[in-house]
């Protein structure tokens, strides 16, 4: 018996979230605060430039003040940090994002630590990561991809409390913060990585399976529990150069209960969440008086 899973439509949810963000921008702007986002991109990598252009376009559509700092690949670490510090002290900017990855030999971790935690729209600063892991009841930014995934799970009424969530991948931008958010939602969380033995025996136990490995079509139908919710964070290229995910979508959607597509799943929600969080940072900067 084959069953066709419910599609978790990231594009549609992103459009809805962007509509809310647009209204929030209007409300804030009416009070004299236009949310501002600065994106720093170093070097000429075409994929990174495309992402940054997309973010810039979306921000402009929503009425967010958007600044793109295109810096040369041979910039020094000290020069890059100076740009970050200048944006830290620019009151028209509420969110700062440094597009990852940075070219060698730049030190991305030091750049992340230099962004003011109050403007860390990616939620990558160790202070914000610490707040997330200690489950502090405060307002702080959270990595946009996992935060967007939580919005998707809520919109599709996926139960988390008491459920087994398996996260494949432990990166700072997806796997680790995803784990913290799922724990906050009272899921039982297993974190796997490329060294995990018997990976597929774990993924088969997942009620919620989040895959962020960068290995195209790693997850097949036999690796998924019938009825499970499958979230594909992959952005891989197939043999024809087409964007595809870490999940074999055609086969797995016959087994899963709910599933995200690539494209049109997690990607658009990441950008929409980035915009949402830019507005939140602008709001918080008002209430904290800083
Ligand atoms: N500091 C930093 N923060 C990031 O959030 C960050 C980053 N660096 N570096 C790169 C990754 C990647 N990322 C994506 C966002 C949206 C789509 C997206 O919208 N994808 C569309 C399709 C785009 C296409 O067709 O290529 C989709 O999945 O439907 C993809 C990838 C954010 N990243």
Image (cartoon, rainbow, N blue to C red):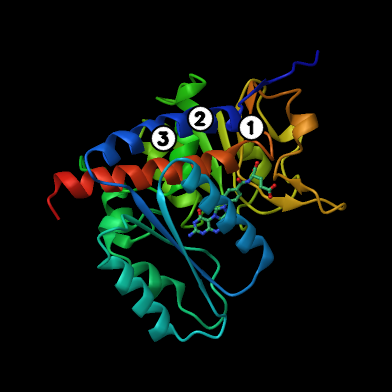
The residue where tag 2 is placed is: 152
The residues bearing labels 3 and 2 have C-alpha atoms spaced at a distance of 19 Å
Q: Element type at marker 2? A: helix
Q: Can residue 228 be seen in this view?
A: yes
**Residue 260 marker:** 1
Q: Comparing marks 3 and 2, which lies closer to the viewer? A: 3
Instruction: Provide residue 209's location: percent of width, then percent of height.
Output: 58, 35
Q: Is mark 3 on a helix, strand or loop?
A: helix
Q: Quadrant of the C terminus?
A: bottom left
Q: Which residue is drawn at 41% across and 29% down?
A: 20
Whether residues under marks 2 and 1 lie with C-beta atoms below 8 angstroms apart, the answer is yes
Q: In which quarter of the image is the N terminus?
A: top right
Q: Quick check: is the Cβ at mark 3 less than 8 Å away from ligand 1?
A: no
Instruction: Tell me residue 181's x, y (percent).
Output: 39, 40
Q: Which residue is drawn at 50% across and 84% down?
A: 75
Asked if residue 128 is positioned above or below residue 139 in the image, the reply reads below
Label 3 crowd (10 A; few <14 / some 14-19 / many >=20): many
**Quick one: label 3 or label 2, which is nearer the N terminus?**
3
State left or right for residue 127 relative to residue 66: left
Residue identified by numbered label 3? 22
User: SS of the residue at dot 1?
Assistant: loop
Q: Quadrant of residue 154?
A: top left
Return the x and y of residue 123 as percentages of the image width and height. 37, 53
């Amino acid at each position: 018996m084959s069953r066709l899973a419910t599609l978790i439509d990231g594009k549609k949810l992103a459009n809805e979230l962007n509509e809310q963000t647009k209204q929030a921008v209007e409300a804030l702007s009416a009070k004299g605060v236009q949310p501002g986002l600065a994106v720093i991109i170093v070097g000429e990598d075409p994929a990174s430039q495309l992402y940054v252009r997309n973010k810039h376009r979306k921000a402009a559509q929503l009425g967010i003040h958007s600044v793109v700092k295109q810096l040369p690949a041979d910039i020094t670490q000290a020069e890059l940090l100076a740009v970050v510090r200048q944006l830290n002290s620019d009151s028209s900017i509420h969110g700062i994002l440094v597009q990852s990855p940075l070219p060698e030999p730049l030190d991305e971790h030091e750049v992340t630590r230099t962004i003011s935690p109050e403007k860390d729209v990616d939620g990558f600063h160790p202070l914000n990561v610490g707040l997330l892991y200690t489950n502090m009841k405060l307002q702080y930014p959270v990595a946009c991809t996992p935060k967007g995934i939580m919005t998707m799970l809520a919109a599709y009424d996926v139960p988390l409390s008491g459920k087994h969530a398996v996260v494949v991948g432990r990166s700072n931008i997806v796997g680790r913060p995803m784990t913290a958010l799922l724990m906050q939602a009272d899921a039982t969380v297993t974190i796997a990585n490329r060294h995990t033995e018997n990976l597929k025996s774990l993924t088969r136990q997942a009620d919620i399976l989040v895959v962020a490995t960068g290995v195209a079509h790693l997850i097949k139908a036999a690796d998924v529990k019938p009825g499970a919710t499958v979230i594909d964070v992959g952005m891989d290229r197939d043999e024809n150069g087409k964007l595809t995910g870490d999940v074999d979508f055609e086969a797995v959607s016959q087994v899963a209960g709910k599933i995200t597509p690539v494209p049109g799943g997690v990607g658009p929600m990441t950008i929409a969440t980035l915009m949402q969080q830019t507005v939140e940072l602008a709001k918080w900067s008002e209430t904290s008086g800083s």
